[in-house]
Image (cartoon, helix red, strand yellow):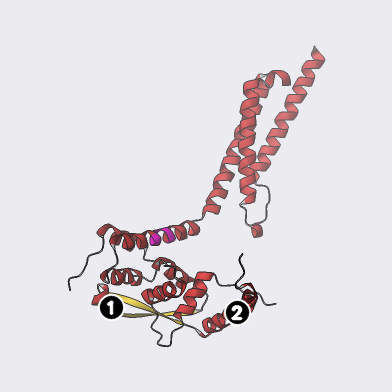
Amino acid sequence: MRKREYLGQLELMVLLAVIRPANDAYGVLISREISGKSGREVALASVYAALERLENKGLVSATLGEPTALRGGRARTYFKPTAAGLKEAREAHETLLRLGAGLSSWQGESA
Amino acid sequence: MSERVPPKLASWLLRRCGSPFHGESLEGDLFEQYQEGRSRAWYWRQVTAVMWIAGGRLLRTLPWTGTARVLSREIAGGAAILAAITVADRARRTHSFGEMMSPAFACILTVLICVGVAGLLIWILTARRRQGRGIGAEMLAFGAVALSAGALTWANAACACQLH
């Protein structure tokens, strides 16, 4: 079995949230996506910390946008997945699906 | 629409602590959301999270292990040298082991030995594996002086017994 570094739960959620067709993922959108889908609010600092770790692992890349008045003259940093990031996300997703297959047999039963 | 100004202190703290997170992007994100109606409490919570994460990162990057290693080594070395000098001095002033090992002296020696051993243990435990775990020159000197002092004391005590 090959040695690999597994992604944390937040890292995986952030990576999945970054994967958008328009490649327009930035801090606020990623945070909203996670909050909307998980029902839990995530601090932007945690999102950025996870993005930084993903960048260091070569799974996402960042591009600086133009400063806008809406943001008080500050630029957005847009994130998009790299090829390795997409591969990692697919593999993690498939692994979770396989591992979660047993959950269906527990539906309707009280713990 | 007039621009809402985020809490000044929070913004200042954010600029101080949030710089590792893609420069001004995080600050811009918070500003953007604040303009969309987020509360001051929310802004403060976000800034607190930034400070918490940035603080944790700073702590992790500090060379604590190296500092602890150097400090423990110095403390152990100091205690060892002090113990050796104390034993030698006490042995010179007294004529028998029993006389030398007064309760006060035994107490001081025990404390110094405990400090020395604790420092030595910390030094060994914080040592990086690739650097090996050899005994330092100070520890060797301590061992030699302590053994010599002990031998002299015993010899002195033995001589005193023979004379009596």
Q: Which quadrant does the N terminus of chain A fall into?
A: bottom right
- Residue that appears at 60% across and 40% down: B76
Name the residue beneath numbered marker 2: A97
Task: Classify residue B140 by image quadrant.
Answer: top right
Secondary structure beneath dot 2 equals: helix
Compared with A49, B81 (above or below) is: above
The numbered disc on residue A67 is 1
Compared with B60, A95 (above or below) is: below
Q: Would residue B94 be seen by someone viewing this image from the given angle?
A: yes
Magenta: main secondary structure: helix
Q: Are marks 2 and 1 in contact (CB under 8 Å)?
A: no
- Residue that appears at 62% across and 41% down: B118
**Closer to the eye: label 2 or 1:** 2
Q: Which residues are magenta?
A: B49-53
Residue A108 placement (x, y as % from top left)? 60, 72
Q: Chain of mark 2?
A: A
Specify few, some or many for label 2: CA neighbours under 10 Å numbering under 14, 14-19, or 20 or more. Answer: few
Residue A35 placement (x, y as % from top left)? 42, 72
Specify few, some or many for label 1: CA neighbours under 10 Å numbering under 14, 14-19, or 20 or more. Answer: some
Q: Would residue B89 be seen by someone viewing this image from the given angle?
A: no
Marks 2 and 1 sit apart, C-alpha to C-alpha, by 40 Å
In the image, is A8 to the left or to the right of A30? right
Query: Which residue type carries mark 1?
Result: Pro
Query: Which residue type carries mark 2?
Result: Leu
Q: Nearer the viewer, residue B88 or B16?
A: B16
Secondary structure beneath dot 1 equals: strand
The numbered disc on residue A111 is none
**Furthest residue toward top:** B164
Q: Nearer the viewer, residue A39 or B46?
A: A39
